[in-house]
Image (spheres, rainbow, N blue to C red):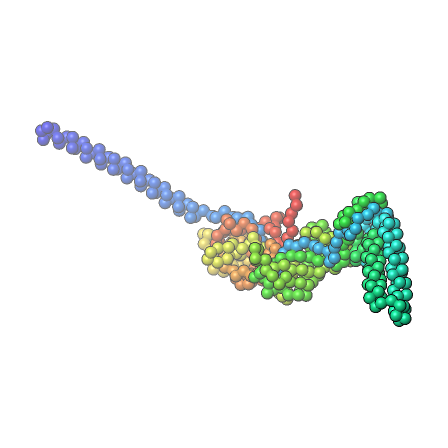
Amino acid sequence: MSETKKKPVVKRMIIMLIGVGVLLGGIIGFNVFKGYMMAKYMAGAPTPPATVTAMKADYQAWQSALNAVGTLRAVRGVDVTSEVAGIVRSVEFRSGDEVRTGQVLAQLNADSDIAQLHALEAAAELAQTVYDRDKAQLDAEAVSKAQVDADAADLKNRRALVAQQGALVDKKTIRAPFGGKLGITMVNPGQYLNPGDKLVTLQSIDPVYVDFYVPQQQLPQVALGQKVVLVADAYKGQSFYGTVNAVNPKVDPTTRNVQMEATIPNPKRLLLPGMFATVSVQAGGEQRYLTLPQTAITYNPYGDTVFIAKPAPPKDAKGTETKEIKDAEQKEAKDAGAKDAKGQPSLVAEQVFVTTGPRRGDQVAILTGIDPGATVVTSGTVKLKNGTPLIVDNSVQPANNPNPAPQEK
């Protein structure tokens, strides 16, 4: 192609490239300008207020406690059974009776055993007579010493048989091994009992024991005689008090827990063996801590924080924050959820670091970071940052119970 023909083509290519460049530059410039204007608008737009709950931090009496679950057990409890076989002649109690030690509960038919006892007693009396006669004749050298020794051995054997038969007859009378409360029996007169058959359950339930376990690392906090507070699901809102009376000298190698035993007085017989209970062992003396609900704490790797609701700094006519807060505005901002003259929230969030202490139920102790009387946000902290306007609505409060109980639905 000649030089004269190439020049128009090159010229057109250059013009086209310049046009494309101008077009792309215009699009890019427009997007940059739009982003700048959007950022400027967002920076100038007010932050929407967040609705939260809040409360004033205050001191509460705090009793350190070790919480565990336990099972109630009778101080003495047994299923009364028969040692020997026999037919029940009479039942001497009613289900649910209170009985004393040694009281007769049932009588088995013992007629043949009593007859056998009388026969053995007669044989023992005869052996006694023979022994006495031969012993008198020994003095006159009418019988040998060996005969008298044989008579003495026979007498002892006869007496042993009488004692054995007497014990068998006594076993036909079933007695309470200790005082307590009887359960429900299904045994009736005329029923045949085999050795070991259950007659009735007998429980001594005043006081009762509660068995529970604590982790081995908490073992130094437990000592004999410490007070125990017990709560049973069967009696809502009622507490029972007792003391620790035994600590197992062996740690369970599977769970690394230590078994504890506490004694709980039970004069009204409300607590029954086998019941499930929540146990709280009071460890140490009573202390006072600044207390907040656990929902108020934000746990972070770099430290625990809470949000405090503080009065928002007032602004001048241009919207610029002033350095001083007027007395009237400060007073108005003290009320949670208060608003300024334009209807905007007059509280803002401020995040502060805190040092947390022991926990109990829904509560946590605050050791450092906030002062008593500070208004602390208790829920809704996820959406907050420093300077976020706040509206406080305490119509629904988070859980703040030192001894929460499972909610049944």
Q: Residue 352: give x, y in percent of width and height.
A: 50, 58
Work out whether residue 301 or residue 371 is closer to the camera in this orientation and state it: 301
Q: Position of residue 349 (x, y in %)?
A: 51, 54
Q: Name the quadrant of the C terminus.
A: top right
The residue lying furthest to the front in this view is 142
Q: Is residue 89 above or below residue 2?
A: below
Residue beneath the point at 83% across and 55% down = 165
Where does residue 226 sit, x and y in percent of width and height? Answer: 67, 64
Relative to 255, 225 lies left or right: right
Residue 73, how many percent across, how many down?
71, 55
Residue occupying image coordinates x 26% and y 37%: 22
Which residue is outermost to the bottom? 139
Give the quarter of the figure containing the N terminus.
Answer: top left
The residue that appears at 84% across and 44% down in the rendered structure is 190
Q: Nearer the viewer, residue 270 or 9?
A: 270
The residue positioned 89% from the left and 68% from the top of the image is 142
